[in-house]
Amino acid sequence: MTNKKTFISKSEKETQQIAIQIVNNYRTGLICLFGQLGAGKTTFVKGLARALKLKDTPQSPTFVYQRIYNGKPSMHHYDFYRLNKVDLTFIEEINESFNDVLVVVEWPDIFIKEMLKKISQKKVKDKIYFFRWNKPRRKIFVELTK
């Protein structure tokens, strides 16, 4: 069952509050974040970290591809913006970890077909789409899979 919601955010704080609302539904699973540069994806991840009460503040993993934030549960944050081909190692890591941690993937576009071959569609918790217009306003579409 898919539940679709639309949020309007007028600030980074509001974007983080939306993330907190969403993560309160579960603590583990896979969230895929779609949106152009500067749309608020990493800001959203910071809100997820706040909701999980993680000690470290997330930073964009664009240049390292992955950052792990330890907690109960932990959060694994991936960013595939700079990748131009599928790396099955990342898919295996995601597949092995998201039952125990919250996995968040920014720029999953190149991986989504391969990920879904390996990962049951039921385990993909949310697909979240960010659209920015008239900075700092953002429209955030959320597909919650329950």
Image: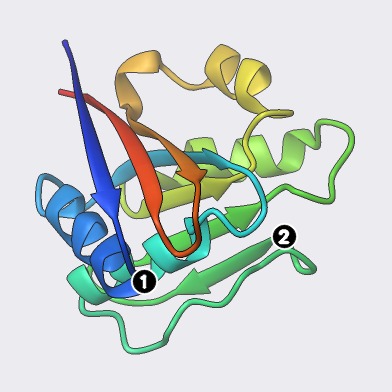
Residue 80 on image: x %, y %: 72, 47
User: In the rendered image, which quarter contains the C terminus?
Assistant: top left
Q: Residues within 10 Å of mark 1 (few under 14, many from 20)?
A: some
Please tell me which residue is depicted at 38% across the width and 61% down the height of the picture: 44
Say which residue label 2 marks.
65
Label 1 residue SS: helix
Label 2 residue SS: loop
**Residue 1 figure quarter:** top left
Amino acid at pointer 2: Tyr
Amino acid at pointer 1: Glu
35 to the left or right of 17: right
Please tell me which residue is depicted at 32% across the width and 89% down the height of the picture: 55
Q: Between 133 and 106, which is closer to the camera in this rendering?
A: 133
Say which residue label 1 marks.
12
Residue 32 on image: x %, y %: 47, 38
Q: Is residue 79 above or below residue 89?
A: below
Residue 34 on image: x %, y %: 54, 38
Residue 99 is at least partly visible in this image? no
122 to the left or right of 109: left
